[in-house]
Amino acid sequence: MSHIRTRIRQNIVTTLTGLSDTKSNVFDSRIYPMNMDTLPGICVYTPSETSGYLSISPPRTLDKVITASIEIYVQMIDEYDERLDQIAADAEEKLYTDLTRGGLATDTKVLSFDSTFSGDVEQPVIMGKLTVEIRYSAVEGSPEG
């Protein structure tokens, strides 16, 4: 069985696959070479996780919090900000349909949204990032949950 963090990330990818704008262009990776065939597209990754102890006797129960980044890439054309906002809204709506990530977590919260653009490529791209917090419990020494 894989690490619970991997399974939660894969759940997010599955949840976001099929949005009306991005369709199947959802990738379980922080580095994915976006090109015209994969735009608009989404990359999902988990840059950090924190732990706190809920009990004091071993094996202790841990309260774990994963930070997931959901990066949305849109080719800069007319109304690209509106398109980015719509994809972000669709993603949030889908994320809130199952706060437990298929029974793996106890809660899911969208914490923030940021956007930027890159003009370094032939066709400029705007990127929006949703930062999401996923909370789950685990027993220490059991990373597979």
Image: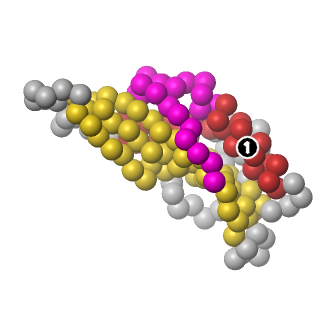
Which residue is at 13% across, 28% downward?
A: 56
Is residue 56 something that shows in the picture? yes
Q: Which residues are magenta?
A: 94-114
The percent coordinates of residue 118 (x first, y second) are: 69, 70
Q: Residue at x 66, y 38 (%)?
A: 91
- Left or right, 16 with respect to 6, comes to right
Q: Position of residue 94 (x, y in %)?
A: 64, 31
Residue wearing tag 1:
87
| Quarter of the view holding residue 38 | bottom right
Residue 145 in view, yes or no: no
Front position in the image: 47 or 102: 47
On the rendered structure, is 120 left or right of 137?
Answer: right
Q: Is residue 132 left or right of residue 87?
A: left
Q: Position of residue 140 (x, y in %)?
A: 19, 35
Residue 47 is situated, as x and y percent measured from the top left of the image, at 43, 53
Residue at 75% across / 46% down in the picture? 85
- Quadrant location of the C terminus in the rendered image: top left
Q: Is residue 113 magenta?
A: yes
In the picture, measured across the screen, residue 80 lies left or right of residue 15, that is right
**Residue with the most extreme left position:** 57
Dot 1 falls on a residue whose secondary structure is helix
Q: Work out whether residue 138 or residue 25 is closer to the camera in this orientation and state it.
A: 138
| Residue shown at the point (44%, 49%) measured from the top left | 46
Q: Is residue 49 magenta?
A: no
Q: Amino acid at mark 1?
A: Ile
